[in-house]
Amino acid sequence: MSEAILEIRHLSKTFGTHAVLKDVDFTVRPGDVTSIIGASGSGKSTLLRCINLLETLTTGEILFHGKSVTAGQINQSAYRARVGMVFQNFNLFNNLTVLDNCLIGQRKVMKAPKKESRDRALYYLNKVGMLPYINARPAQISGGQKQRVAIARALAMEPEVLLFDEPTSALAPEMGGEVLDVMQSLAAERMTMLVVTHEMGFARDVSSHVVYMADGVIVEEGPPSQVLANPRDARTREFLKRFLNGTNR
């Protein structure tokens, strides 16, 4: 078995008296496509934000290639450059063009030379089908196109892991399909991805690993054939039943 890229150990996160995450453990290995599913409020997005250090852990540890990020064994800025994030609402800079949105991180964080960063940005914008729009601003393109730009921006940093927080939930179905197609092509290229999603088709067909969360804990995890088709835990079965019936809340 290959060496883990990420190891999450005993991660807990509390806001005031409310425990959002409770003693969460799991491992991400190269080429894994892990879908995290669960009802609203189960802690899925908070987990991603903790992994990307957008939230401070209450307790626990994050290891990156065996080194503790939380204990300072690896520089946090360097770590965040290697673990990219794609947000539900795109988080593009509205005053910048599509191309400049894909350049700014490379220039400011990676200190990449102008030509190198431009070539890299153009390569990834072409990869997600957004090369014709490099001079457009976010207000001039659709939601699906914005999300594809956000993916290109994350890829331009050449991360080892990409985190996706409900990347299609703000999009109409046809636009969400554009984004899922890009993610499926990345999975086929063995990009390591951790995806919080309500897209059960993606979880079933593209994921190598599915994690079901409820009330801040991992209830069940394993291959899609087990978790989605033959869940062992009654809570997983009930969630899937409600979700498929369109009553998930």
Image (cartoon, helix red, strand yellow):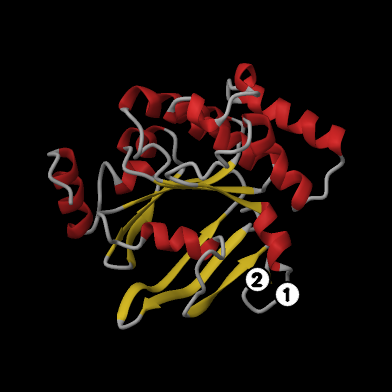
Residue 156 position, x and y percent, is: 69, 38
Name the residue tied to disc 2: 69
242 in relation to 179, above or below:
below
Residue kind at label 2, given as amino acid type: Val
The residue lying toward the viewer, choosing from 54 and 235, is 54
From where the camera sits, is residue 158 visible? no
* Residue at image location 55% in from the left, 39% down from the top: 94
User: Residue at left 26%, top 55%?
Assistant: 40
The mark tally for this picture is 2
Label 1, on which residue? 73
For the residue pair 244 and 219, the one nearer the viewer reads as: 244
* SS at mark 2 in the image: loop
Dot 1: element? loop
Q: For this view, does 223 lie left or right of residue 182?
A: left
Q: To which quarter of the image does residue 153 belong?
A: top right
Judging depth in this view, the residue of 242 and 220 nearest the camera is: 242
Outermost residue to the front: 95
Residue flagged by tag 1: what amino acid is it? Answer: Gln
**Callout 1: few (<14), some (14-19), or many (20+) C-alpha neighbours within 10 Å?**
few
Tell me which residue sits at (17%, 58%) in the image.
234
| 185 over 170 or under it: above or below | above
Q: Are marks 2 and 1 in contact (CB under 8 Å)?
A: yes
Residue 200 x/y as whole percent: 31, 38
Q: Is residue 175 visible?
A: yes
Residue at x 50%, y 65% (from the top left corner): 50
- Residue 78: quarter of image: bottom right
Q: Position of residue 113 (x, y in %)?
A: 87, 41
Q: CA distance from mark 2 to mark 1?
A: 6 Å
Q: Outermost residue, bottom direction? A: 17
Residue 185, placed above or below residue 41 = above
State the residue lying farthest toward the top.
132
